Image: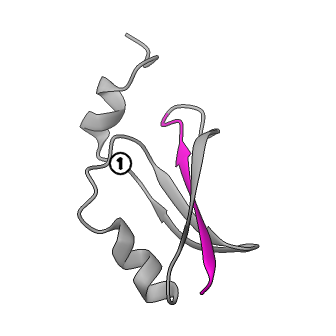
Amino acid sequence: MPHYRLYHLDPHSGHIRTAEDFAAADDAAALAELRGRRLAHPLELWQGGRKLAHIDAPPEAAALSPGSPD
């Protein structure tokens, strides 16, 4: 089963905050894993050196995130 890495990005700098690894049957299953998540910051989904998706958080989520400029 392929391994995937989901990067949680800082909405202001774009730098990686944290990462989570998981296994999925294929790319479609890995992308389905992201459905239904409430986004508080942007995410990127990778499988090895291949970026599968970049998902932006809604603008209101960035405005509410810790460390956001006032």
- Residue at screen point 41% across, 84% down: 29
- Residue at screen point 48% across, 37% down: 11
Q: Residue furthest right?
A: 49
Residue 63, image x and y in percent? 32, 27
Badge 1 marks a residue whose secondary structure is loop
Check disc 1: other Cα within 10 Å, few if <14, some if 14-19, many if 20+: some
Work out whether residue 4 or residue 57 is closer to the camera in this orientation and state it: 4
Which image quarter holds the C terminus?
Answer: top left
Q: Is residue 23 left or right of residue 15?
A: left
Residue 31, image x and y in percent? 42, 76
Query: Vertical placement of 33 versus 42: above or below?
Result: below
Work out whether residue 29 or residue 69 is closer to the camera in this orientation and state it: 29
Which image quarter holds the N terminus?
Answer: bottom right
Query: Vertical placement of 23 versus 19: above or below?
Result: below
Q: Amino acid at mark 1?
A: Ala
Q: Which residues are magenta?
A: 1-11
Say if the magenta span includes residue 5.
yes
Say if the magenta span includes residue 9.
yes
Work out whether residue 33 or residue 15 is closer to the camera in this orientation and state it: 33
Q: Main secondary structure of the magenta part?
A: strand
Work out whether residue 22 or residue 39 is closer to the camera in this orientation and state it: 22
Q: Is residue 43 left or right of residue 19?
A: left
Residue 64, image x and y in percent? 29, 25
Tell me the residue that label 1 is attached to: 57
Query: Vertical placement of 24 versus 8: above or below?
Result: below
